[in-house]
Structure formats: C-alpha cells, structure tokens
Image (cartoon, rainbow, N blue to C red):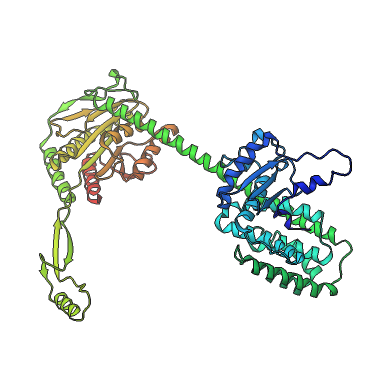
Amino acid sequence: MSAHHHIQPTPDDDTDLARWDDDGAPPTQPRSSPAAWLRVGAELGDRLVALSGRQDLLVTCRPGTRSGAPAAFFPTLGEVEFDARLFAPLKHHEIHPRIVGDEERYPAAWGVFVHEAAHAAHSIWTAPAGANPRVVEAALLLEESRVEGAHLITRPTDRTYLRTSARTLVMPDIAHPTLQGIEHAAAVAALILGRRDVGILDAGETRAVADLCEKVLGADLLATLTRIWTAAHQCADHDTTTMLAHGQDWCDALDTAAPTLPVPENLTDLLSGAVGVVMDSTEATDAADLAAQAAATNAMATRSRTQANDRAQQASRRRQAAATASSVFNSGGATVNPDGTPAPYSNPVTGTRRPTAAEKSAAARLSRALRAAAYRERTEEQTTSPTPPGRLNMGRALARDAQRAAGSIPSAEPFTQTRRRNSPTPPLRVGIAVDVSGSMRAACAPVASAAWIVARAAALTDPDSRTATIAYDTHLTALTRPTHRAPERVTTFGANGSSHNLANALDALDHGLELSRPGAGRLLVIVTDAVYTPDETAQAVTRVKQLTTAGCAVLQLTLTAKSQHLPGTTLLHLPQPSSAPAAIATAATDAIRRTR
C-alpha cells in the first residue's frame, strides 16, 4: 500500500509517447479533460482558494487521472487533478461547486477534494535528490494524517468530509497493497489510527484496527509507531529534515521488530476486514449524525413556522381587538356585536342618574388613596470628584495629599455631591368587565356605582389615568369610556342577556386602556359568576393569561357560592353586593402601589 499516490512528481508525457515509437502501433492521444468537465474543474479551482489559502493552483477534472489515484496533487506543477467519476451518478451539468453548499450533494467527492486541498496547503516540504526512497515513502505515509490534522485546525467544519474521504481513499489502497507483511499492518495503523489521533476518526470507531494491529505488531512496536506519527503531526509544513527523520525512525522501528514478529498468512484479508469494520462504523455514525441534524433542522423549521403562525395570529387578534374597541367605545352608548355592527335591541343600559353623596365621598377617598399609593420618594445619587463643587471629605483629601507626596498619581476624590431626582408618578389603568346575563342582576347596581367611583377617582388623581367599563353578554356595551374627563352621571344597567362574550370584552378593554403595556398601575376586574360553556371559558382564559403574563392584575368578583373560578384570576367572593365598590377600590390601590 502506497500513500504517495496523492502527491505526485511532474508527469513526463513525452516518455509515455515514446513507448509507442517502435512497435508500429498508432501513437496514443494525450488524455485531456472533456469540454463538459472544464467548467467543473474551473469552479473547483475557485473553491480551492478558500480551502488551501493558495491562489496559484490549477484544478483539472476529467474521467480518470494520470496518477491512477482518485485525485492527486502535483507540487511542482501547482496542479490538483480530480477524477470526475467520483461525482457519479451526478452528471457534469448537475454539479456546481462554485455555489457554497452544493458539495452536500456529493460528500464523498468533496471529501477527496478537501484531502487534496490539505496536501496543497501543508505538503510544502520536498524530498532532496538522493534521499532513500523507502524513507521518503514512510514520510509520505505519515504525511497523510498530518495534513488532515493541520487542515482541521483552520477549517474544523471540514471534518465530516475528511471522514468520507478516508472511506474513498484508504479502502482501495487496502485492497491493493504495495507493501507486504508487517509493513502493510504498520501502514494501515498509520492511516487509520493516525487519523484517530488528529480527530478525524473516533476511538470507538477504530477499535477493530487498533486491536488487530496490536495483535500483529505487538504492543511495544505499535506504541513506538504511535509516538512517531504523533511527533510527525507536530512537524512544520516546510520542515523536510524532521519529516525525513520521522520516516527514518519508522523504517528503523520496523527493521528492528519485523524479524521477530510472525506474519499471519491471511494478513491482507484480516486488515481489509478490520478496516471495513471501521469504515462501516464511521458511515453509520455519519448517517446517524446526518439524521440527527436533519431532525434538528426540521424541528427548528417547525418551531419557526409555529412562531410565525403565532405572530400572525397575535397580529390578527390585535387588529380585531382594535376594531372591537373602536366600535364599542365610539358607539355613543349603543350596543354592538363583536364585529362592530349595531345591536340596538340588546342594550342593557336603563338610564343615568346623579351620583349620591356617599358615592362622591367614596370617589374622593379613593382619589386620596391612589395619590398616596402612587407617591414615590425622590431618588438620591452620590458622585465623587477630585475638584469642587461638592462637600469636602477631609479623609479623602488627606489621602490625596499623601498619594501626591508619595509620587503616585492621586486617585482619591475628596468632593462628594448628592443629586436628588423626583420619581415620576405612575398613572392608573382600570378596566371593568361586568357580566349582564340573567344570573347577574344583583351585581348591576353596585357595579354601576363602582364604575363611576373608580372613573371619578382616577380622573381626580392623574390626568393620564384611564378607566373603562364594558357590560357584556353576547353583545358589548360601553358603560364608561377611557377619556380624560370624569363622568358626571352614573350609568345604570340591567342584566337580561344570554350567553357570554368575555373574550371580546377583554380585547376591547386591553386595547382601549393598554393593559398589556408596562409603565402604569394596571388592573382588570371581571364581575361574573363564570357559568360559561367550555368554549367561552377557553377563550376568556387565553386572554386572562396574556394579561397576567404582561403584568396586569386580574381580579374576579363573584356574588354567589355557585360561581365558578376563571383560571388565572384572583378570586374574591362578595357575599354582600354592596361591598363591590370598596373591593374594586382596594384592588386598584394595590395595583398602583405595586407599580415600579
């Protein structure tokens, strides 16, 4: 088995032609690349620049090669020849190496090309005239794994292709060896185990060859050979003397140990079988890695599609919520369907009334409580400096003088300045959604009162505060709107509806009050017994989860023991409906107090 097939001297075509001069046969025609493969060779040459770091190389691609190897590098010509048959079953018009990524369709061929690129980049040393051919052959054997290891340092992602090249390049040399006996086993060890030690192959994959070579060569000789190829891996690209010295050490080790080692009669078959096991193992590993990578890519693509669909659905919901909020809050008190069309015969509003003295007093108390909860202490920030302004710290001043006297650069900063900044007062956002189905009649009066109290208090507290109240059954009706002005009168309503459309009510409140946007004390109050259908509950819970995730507090007020709990809300049961205004006021105060 010969490793030098991949590094060739300058060919002598005239000598080849001269063989036919005297035998009467017609002279052979020089083999040249068919025109169809010229483009492929040119594009391989373009990619060779990045692979080898050299711009002075030519790539010829044609069926068959002058050297007989699948590919070869001619250092003196600056040429890499490549057998086009490696691309089979692809045709020349199907191959476009200039396109990065096209090599994934022919990994075996590309692996051979990467191997030759490694030779082009790192096989810089040349044997001097008169060097021992056997020593040169041994050095070139060590060169195979050395150049691949050096290539991996700069292009670690090419490991997969170098693994495929091992199957393409090594196996034919095993089947048709030029070395015999112990030298054959040593060469197999260098080619397989040497690639293991530079990280091309895994230790588990090469165990069959390692065990066989230890049995044939002996543990001592195999350890000696391992030290030689490991040292060669550290050799510089241009160091001819050291590479030839390693080649000499290789020959000396074999000459010393070979006479005492028995050679199995079927050694070639044993080595071919062991290498076949290694190559099957690497192929299985590569296939498993490729399948895992494909599965990961598919999972990522699926996740991306899912995320894109989620974003599209969220955008669609936001547009629908904006349309719903616009139709509800701009309807002039009329009842609307979720799509914005009027529903005049389902309006729960029964009229308006003047607020009572107790309601005015409650609004004033809530306004004071909200202002107190929203108050933030001024923040203080202390800074130091070597010069005024600021308060002088004598300890630091003395330290600065001492540093200056000692000849060092003064670092102490004796002047301290305190800056005080007022913290902004957070506004309040309170949305109230009240169920006006037939089972909620007891809540109508206290919720109407609570809606007016909260809206009035918010307007008195901060001009940026907003509140809104929506009555919902199948349809939606705005009882109070998110405006700067406090309502003058209390809107009264009844509860005679059927079904429940809480999801659209929450969308309208969220969009109208920006309940999902940080920077304000945000509270959503849902007054309902939550006796819904599964579909109604699922839609409502989805909106509640979105709001709680965004940091909005969600409170559910119930009036009867038969009420259900909406998941995600804080449940508050009120045996006395008249306590609803106080409960909502307390929750609003807590919401603005927690705002940071």
- Whole-percent x, y for residue 442 in the image: 27, 33
Which residue is at a point 15% across and 40% down the rendered structure image?
457
- Whole-percent x, y for residue 508 in the image: 30, 31
- Whole-percent x, y for residue 426 in the image: 20, 46
Which residue is at a point 36% across and 45% down the rendered structure image?
549
Viewer-side residue, 19 vs 314: 19
Residue 348 can be seen, yes or no: yes
423 sits to left or right of 27: left
Viewer-side residue, 3 vs 550: 3
Viewer-side residue, 15 vs 568: 15
Residue 561 can be seen, yes or no: no
Classify 83 as above or below 387. above
Which picture quadrant has residue 403?
Answer: bottom left
Classify 369 as above or below 258. above
512 sits to left or right of 167: left
Q: Quadrant of the N terminus?
A: bottom right
Which picture quadrant has residue 561?
Answer: top left
Which picture quadrant has residue 555?
Answer: top left
Q: Residue furthest front?
A: 22
- Whole-percent x, y for residue 6 in the image: 71, 54
